[in-house]
Amino acid sequence: MTISEHFTLEELTFSEAATRLGLDNTPIPIVITNLGRVAAAMERIRTLLGDKPIVVHSGYRSAEVNRAVGGVVTSAHCRGLACDFVCSAFGTPAEVALATLKSDIEYDQLILEYGWVHVGLAQEGLLCRREALTKRSPGAAYESGIRA
Ligand SMILES: [Zn+2]
C-alpha cells in the first residue's frame, strides 16, 4: 500500500527481526496515521537529496520487535514516528544528516547513527524539538550535533 509518492506502508513496517523471530509488527490505525506523516517528511527529505532513492532500514517497530532489536523503550519507532534510512546515491549517512540539518524540514530528532540516519517526528500537536545528535556505535552515548 502506497502512503506517499515514493513510500509504501510495507517498507515502513517491514522488520527483518520480526520476520526472523516470528514477531507481530502489524501497525494499529494511529500508527498508520503517524507513518503517513513520516512518509510526508521522507518525501521532503528525498526532494532535498535530489530525488535519489531512499532505502528504509526501519520504520515502525512494535514493542516486542523494539525489545528484540534493543531499541530504547520510549523510541519514536514504536509509535510509527521515526524512520532509519540511507540514501547512498546522495552520499554517506553523515552527508545526508548534514543536508537535512541545514534544511528547513521539520523534525523532532535527527540522529546520525552508525550506518544510517534516524529522523523522528513529534507527536501530532506537539512542538518539534529539532534536536540533532550523533551516535557512533551501539554502546556509545549520544553526542550533541551532527558530527561526521
Ligand atoms: Zn531510529
Image: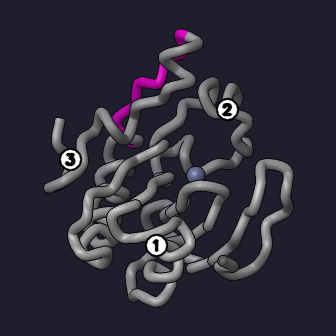
- The percent position of residue 130, horizontal first and vertical second, equals 56, 79
Q: Which mark is residue 107?
A: none
Query: Marks 2 and 3, Cα distance to the nearest angstrom?
Result: 25 Å
Q: Which residues are magenta?
A: 22-30
Mark 2: amino acid: Val
Neighbourhood count class around disc 1 (C-alpha, 10 Å): few under 14, some 14–19, many 20 upward: many
Residue sitting nearer the eye, 9 or 48: 48
Q: Quadrant of residue 146?
A: bottom right
* Secondary structure at numbered mark 2: loop
- Whether residue 26 is in magenta: the answer is yes
Are the residues tagged 1 and 2 within 8 Å (C-beta)? Answer: no
Mark 3: amino acid: Ile
- 20 to the left or right of 44: right
Residue sitting nearer the eye, 13 or 128: 13
- Whether residue 133 is in magenta: the answer is no
Q: Which mark is residue 3?
A: 3
- State the residue position of label 1: 96
Number of the front mark, 2 or 3: 2
Mark 1: amino acid: Val
Query: Marks 1 and 2, Cα distance to the nearest angstrom?
Result: 24 Å
